Image (tube, rainbow, N blue to C red):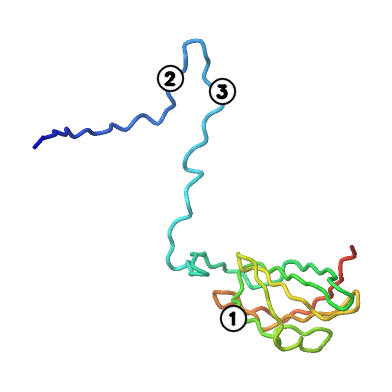
Amino acid sequence: MMCVYCAPSFAAPGSEDFPPLPFDQEPPEEELPDKQHYKRPPKDPDNIIHYRGNRAYTENLPLEIVHTRCERKAENIVSIVIFFNQSINPLTLRSDSFHLNNKVIPFGMRFHFNKKGNSVSMLLPVTEDTFKLKVQNISSFDGKIIEPVELLIEVDSE
């Protein structure tokens, strides 16, 4: 039987500075950025919600539509993307959440969301180049409900 002796070794932390410069080289004139600027936000469990497996901070802002984008896919079909100022709860979207030219959109409409959850896209049966879309009864993930808003949407020309 062979015995191997191991001596514990402890690594000493090095200095925070860079290694010394060669004798013929001058140090850079600009200072290194301070590490304080790169800290994560403080942990605040009262303002953290869990959304799609990620922790997100709640915002004290009303849920609003920021931007829309609409383009024609076929002669009678348009694709519309609605961007919100915060993540929306996908369970609150139903066909009665959208009124197209004062009529509820067809039942069974499929909604697609981006990874962040702050936009929804859908295909709508529209032949005109300008139409009205009323958005209502949608809530953010932390429970804020959007005020009903009627949008005048123009289809982007290609």
Q: Nearer the viewer, residue 67 or 124?
A: 124
Instruction: Look at 82% across and 74% down and name the residue there.
Output: 78
Q: Are marks 1 and 3 in contact (CB under 8 Å)?
A: no
Q: The N terminus lies in which quarter of the figure?
A: top left
Q: Amino acid at mark 1?
A: Leu
> In the displayed structure, would residue 73 be above or below residue 104?
above
The amino acid type found where label 2 is placed reads Pro
Q: In the image, is residue 156 above or below residue 33?
A: below
Residue 105 horizontal/vertical position (percent): 76, 86
Q: CA distance from mark 1 to mark 3?
A: 56 Å
Camera-nearest residue between 69 and 36: 69
Graded by Cα atoms within 10 Å as few (under 14), some (14 to 19) or many (20 or more), the crowding at tag 1 reads few
State the separation of the CA atoms marked 3 and 2.
15 Å
Q: Secondary structure at mark 2?
A: loop
Q: In the visual, does 55 lie left or right of 63?
A: left
Name the N-terminal-most of marks 3 and 2: 2
To which residue does mark 3 refer?
A: 29
Of all residues, the one furthest to the left in this rendering is: 1
Q: Which residue is mark 2?
A: 20
| Image-based side of 6 in relation to 60, left or right | left
Give the amino acid type for the residue marked by disc 3 in the picture. Glu
Q: For residue 132, what is the image quadrant?
A: bottom right
Residue 29, given in percent of the width and then of the height, sits at 56, 23
Residue at 91%, 74% in the rendered image: 129
Which label sits in the foreground, 1 or 3? 1
The residue to which callout 1 is attached is 91
**Secondary structure at numbered mark 1:** helix
Extreme-top residue of the structure: 24
Indicate the position of residue 116 as horizontal and vertical percent values: 60, 65
